[in-house]
Image (cartoon, rainbow, N blue to C red):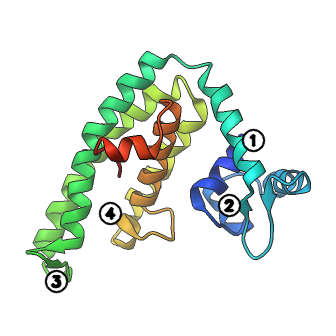
Amino acid sequence: MSELTVLQAVRLKGRISEADLVATLDEDSADVAATVAQLAAVGLLVTGKALRISPEGRARLNALLAEERSGVDPNVLATSYGDFRAINNEFKALISDWQIKDGQPNSHDDAEYDAAILNRLDNVHQQVLPVIATVTTQLARLGAYAAKLDSALGKVKAGDTTWLARPIIDSYHTVWFELHEELIAASGLTREEEARAGHAT
């Protein structure tokens, strides 16, 4: 269990219980617990009711991400991130349409309207998987995002639409947001730069 993987997961979540960290990482609980204990012992994680990253942990994570980034082909990342941005525009529109209908909060009482949006999600999913596959040739750990998106999509298609956009679980939108964060960092950019350029999720 690498410290980069654990620190990044905690940073992306903000605050997270150890049980939820195990679930989102989909790793052996004993391995996760051992890594958390090691990181907490040297002040990189703060423990309590929830785990959070310390300022020292954030600095260490930034150094680890920079080291990881030094080993990738920047052209592959730039091309893949460009592809992701285009799909991201579709996904943002989809989420907006899911949440708002005719200028009002979507009451989800129009099954035909909702089904049309979920059909669009299938299309977005099929577009993003090749992007993740290409990125994974450079950063193997990002391959986990394909499985997490698959899992969330499966739950949505099984009828539990809370797994589309609910913020406190690994919903499709939550995983998508975290993947976007990963791609921004891997491309050597910042969210602030991307927000100014109109590319934030």
The residue carrying mark 2 is 21
Q: Nearer the viewer, residue 16 or 157?
A: 16
The residue carrying mark 3 is 109
Q: Is residue 160 visible?
A: no
Q: Is residue 132 above or below residue 120?
A: above
Q: Which disc, if any, is residue 117?
A: none
Q: Nearer the viewer, residue 42 or 168?
A: 42
Mark 1 vs mark 3, foreground winner is 1
Q: Residues within 10 Å of mark 1 (few under 14, many from 20)?
A: some
Real-space Cα distance between discs 4 and 3?
17 Å
* Dot 1 and dot 3 residues touching (CB under 8 Å): no
How many numbered discs?
4
Question: In the image, what residue type sits under mark 3?
Answer: Asp
Q: Which disc, if any, is residue 157?
A: 4
Residue 190: x percent and y percent?
Answer: 48, 40
Question: In the image, what residue type sits under mark 4?
Answer: Lys
